[in-house]
Image: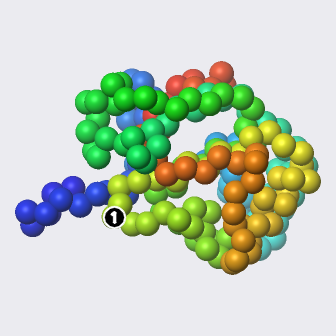
Amino acid sequence: MHLHNLNYPVDICTFSSPSKLLRFGFSAMFGFGARTLALAEKHRWMPSNQRRDFAVIKTLASLKPEECELSFLPLKNSLQGSQENVTKVQWHTIQGHFLNVSIMAIPSLCSMAPRGLAPNTRLNNGSMALIVVRNTSRSEFIKHLKRYASVKNQGTWTHFIICMNLYYAYNSPHLGQGYWL
């Protein structure tokens, strides 16, 4: 963004399919987080705390991984806003079954995560956090969710990939292809 003769990085994502822009946003989830939010939204008539707990428990009961391929540029390789050179750099690609994929341009503070879902993100730095949870046992995943509630210890585990990035693409048999920038 250019404002008063100064350039500022913008912390916003565009969500698009190969053919059209879908929307702008600050965060997106695929898998557990998205299913939980969708279920909570369907039960808006419940009080908020009950609705949140109901959605989390019901989604955990039917926890299943999604097959997906993720491609991303780590922050050290990012293009500083230049979309023309995206195809010329070395993309990191991982594929497999994932319980949750989150991309956050802001910390996304909430009552269940006092430091946020992506506590290391910062405004005005032009980067995003990509948080990927590989397929793991339900008990290990619950331990991961409990760590979000802790103010002290939200560190990484072997089933999780956490990186800062600028540009991200996914390919899912169920959702097709999409891009988040």
Q: Is residue 143 left or right of residue 18?
A: right
Q: Amino acid at mark 1?
A: Asn
| Residue 84, percent from left and from top | 25, 30
Instruction: Name the one closer to the observer, 170 or 17.
Output: 170
| Residue 131, percent from left and from top | 61, 50
Is residue 35 in sight in this rendering? no
Q: Is residue 24 left or right of residue 85?
A: right
Residue drawn at x 46%, y 57% is 105
* Residue that protrudes farthest toward the front in the picture: 76
| Residue 177, percent from left and from top | 52, 25
Label 1 secondary element? loop
Residue drawn at x 55%, y 50% is 163
Q: Is residue 125 left or right of residue 49?
A: left
Q: Is residue 174 above or below residue 146?
A: above
Instruction: Name the one closer to the observer, 40 or 111.
Output: 111
State the residue position of label 1. 124
Residue drawn at x 65%, y 21% is 173
